[in-house]
Amino acid sequence: MRKWIEAMRLRTLPVSVAGVLAGCGCAVWQDGFSLFPALLCLLFALSAQIASNFGNEYYDFKNGVDRKGREGFRRGVTEGDISPHMMKYATFFMLGLAAVIGCLLLLYGSFWLVLVGGIILLFALAYSAGPYPLSHHGLGDITVVIFFGVIPVTFTCYLQTGGWGQLPVLLTTSVAIGLLAANVLIVNNYRDKEDDEAVGKHTTVVLFGRKAMSLVYLFSGILAMAIMTPLWMQMPLWALFVPLVFLLLHLFTWRRMSSSRGAALNPLLGRTALNLLTFTLLLLALFIFC
C-alpha cells in the first residue's frame, strides 16, 4: 500500500485541490456555492491527477526515460516495486473512476460538458503517452496552467453557479492558480535536469537551463499576484495581506530552490505545492468574509 501511495505523489495533489478551492471561492463570491457539485469536482480533479501520475510512471518506464536511482521520488515501476501491468491497469481504473464522477457532474451542467471531461482525461494521458508526449517536448508547463488552473477554477465555479458571472475575476484567478501550479512542475524538472537530458526528455529546464527557469519560477509567482488586480481592486485594503503573505513564502522558497540541487529539492517541491494551497485557502477566506 505504501508503494501505491508513493506512486500517487501526495506532495503534488494540493495542486488539484487548489484549483477546485479557488473555483469554489469564485462561486461564493457570486453567492452560488453548492456543496455536492464542489465535492464531485474535487474528486474528479484528484482522480484525474492520480491517473496522470500513474500514467507518467508507466509510460516513462515503457519509453525508457526513467532510470533507477534517480534524484527524484522513488518510481515504483522503474525500481521494480510495482509491475508495469499493474500500473497500467491502475492508470485506466483511475481514468474510469474520473469518468464516472464526471458523468455525475452532468446533473449540474449541460451535456456538452462530456466533451470537456473527455479532453481533460485525454490530456491526463497525453502528458506522458502517445506519439508526442507533452512533458517530453517542453509543453508540460503550459499544460499545467490550463488543466490545473484555467479549467478547474472556471468549471468548478460554473457547475455551482450555472453561469460565467464576474468573468474578469474568474479568468484572472484561474490563470494565477495555473501559474502557481506550473511552478510545482518547474521544481520537479529543475531537480531532474541531468536525468532528463541523459534520456532525451526535453523539459523547459533542459531547453532553457536552470538559471532561466529559476527566474521564470520567481516571476510566475509575482505575475500571478499582479494579474489578480481586478479582484484586489474590489477588496478592502487589508485584503492585500493575502498576496503579501504568499509573496514572502514564494521568495523564501525560490531562494532555497535556486541554491539547491538533487534530492534536496524534493522538500521544496512539496513546499511549492503547499504555498499554492496556503494562498488558495487565504483567497477562499477572502471570498467568504469580504
Image (cartoon, rainbow, N blue to C red):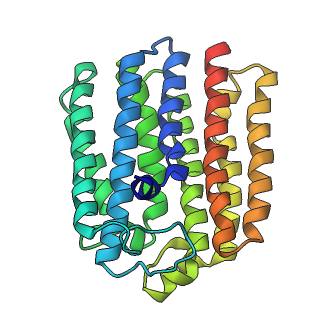
Q: How many discs mark residues in the rendered view?
A: 0
Above or below, 261 relative to 109: below
Image coordinates for residue 128, horizontal then vertical, percent: 34, 66
Camera-side residue: 78 or 191?
78
Rendered view: 23 above or below 172: above
Q: Determine if residue 28 is in view.
A: yes
- Quadrant of image for the C terminus: top right
Q: Residue at x 61, y 25 (%)?
A: 284
Left or right of 100 in this view: 58? right
Judge by depth and name the residue closer to the eye, 267 or 173. Answer: 267
Residue 287 located left or right of residue 163: right
Q: Compare residues 89 and 112 and report the one nearer the observer.
A: 89
Q: Position of residue 188 (x, y in %)?
A: 56, 65
Q: Does 4 sit above or below residue 81?
A: above
Residue drawn 41% across the image and 75% down it:
79
Horizontal arrangement in the rendering, residue 132 relative to residue 206 (left or right):
left
Point out the residue furthest to the left here.
111
- Would you say 53 lies left or right of 215 here? left
Residue that appears at 18% across and 29% down = 111
Q: Is residue 256 positioned above or below 90 on the image?
A: below
Q: Position of residue 171 (x, y in %)?
A: 50, 36
Q: Position of residue 141 (x, y in %)?
A: 49, 61
Query: From where the camera sits, is residue 163 visible?
Result: no
Residue lying furthest front: 1
- Residue lying at 41% horizontally and 24% vertically, measured from the top left: 38
Looking at the image, the residue that sits furthest to the bottom is: 198
